[in-house]
Image (cartoon, grey):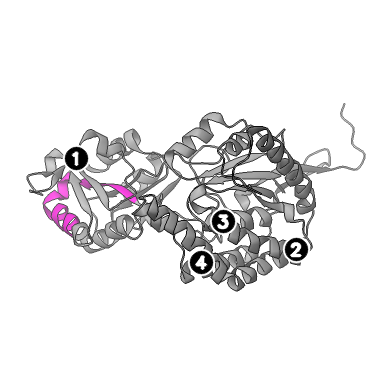
Amino acid sequence: MPDQLQSDNIHTLMLDIGKRARQASKALAIASAETKNTALDAMADAIFASEAEILNANAKDVARARENGITGSFIDRLELNESRVRAMAEGIRAIAALKDPVGDVIAAWDRPNGLQIERVRTPLGVIGVIYESRPNVTADAGALCLKAGNAVILRGGSDSAHSARAVHAALKTGLSAAGLPEDAIQIVPTTDRAAVGEMLAGLNGNVDVIVPRGGKSLVARVQSEARVPVFAHLEGLCHIYVDQSAELEMAKDIVVNAKMRRTGICGAAETLLIDKAAADRFALPLIEALEARGCLVRVDHDMLSLATARTEASDEDWSTEYLDAVIAVKLVDGISGAIGHIEKYSSHHTEAVIAEDPEVVARFFNEIDSAILLHNASTQFADGGEFGMGAEIGIATGKMHARGPVGVEQLTSFKYCVRGSGQTRA
């Protein structure tokens, strides 16, 4: 299938993909846990066996990206190595080891009239995943959707096209090994952006949910144009607040890890807030620890007297997701000042507090409305794998049932099963 097609052909192609996904979803909805796990284990085996092919395909994508002048965090997200390929396979095995959510009884109760009511998990149906440069999303999304009994339509970006197709081939091998329809995990065979528009329109009602994984412009388009529900976050503008009650050495370790472990992920810290009452003790040590790891620090005006020769932060810095080795640092009036700043600038993704005062921690947890809140831990734990979910299809910051890491449980809905013994309503 060529990458570029005429618009009429794309419309026909995408409607056919949607129709086949809907049909496949019916088989997945009633597939046993054993069958799904057999497929997942076979997928992991196929990824291990295809490591050379996947790396060769990825090398083409990386070379093309470099030729186009792309560097930095984008290359980090795109590039695979042996360790990352094997991590994909192990991630699929971890998903296989999870409890099957489908059919799980969430709640059950009896009514005075003898009716027995159960709330039972059920698959969403067909999920569309639109993503950009991360090849591992192909494996994570395919495996998570399968475990939750959903069919999935994957639309990767042109930058990772070769990598995504190589990984997808391994996933199809796993489906065939378990006797499940290959249409359960489809990849859009064109990089034309018109295909995205078709998915956002819902493919004649055959897409139940859209999950975007990528940059702000992609997510903004999806949220603006989608005619089906969306699980997403627009950006990861994550904050760390260091209270005067914090332990300095712990704070240094956490702040450096939160910013510098991987700067290009959505859980990377972008703003550091420091309690004014501890500025003399904490400001320079924290800044110097970041700079020692190669981070550019931009400080607010109040901190210039403590951190001379640093760049002064502008108003824009407080609302910037750098995805790079840059961080904005601000002095605030204790926990109240931190809460006020976060309320104003947060993208409601992930925030962390470093403190030993339990009242400060309680206020942070109770008053900040972000999807993930951490105490004395790095924001880089904002990850489904780290939450014990095996993997995640993304982070959602909305107020619907899927919030925070979207794992297998979040990829289900529920239905009510009511058992009676002849009851009729008066």
Label 2 vs label 3: CA separation? Answer: 18 Å
From the viewer's perspective, is the residue at label 1 or at label 4 nearer?
4
Nearer to the camera, 189 or 347:
189
Question: Within 10 angstroms of label 1, few (less than 14), some, or many (20 or more) residues?
Answer: some
Q: Residue at x 37, y 51 (%)?
A: 70
Residue 369's spot in the image, x, y percent?
42, 39
Q: Which residue does the numbered mark 1 point to in the structure image?
A: 313
Residue 97 part of the magenta segment: no
From the viewer's perspective, is the residue at label 1 or at label 2 nearer?
2
Q: Residue at x 68, y 39 (%)?
A: 14
Nearer to the camera, 73 or 338:
73
Q: Which residue does the numbered mark 3 point to in the structure image?
A: 164
Q: Which residue does the numbered mark 4 point to in the structure image?
A: 55
Label 2 vs label 4: CA separation? Answer: 23 Å
Apparent side of residue 80 relative to residue 402 in the rendered image (left or right): left
Locate the C terminus and report the quarter of the image it occupies.
Answer: top right
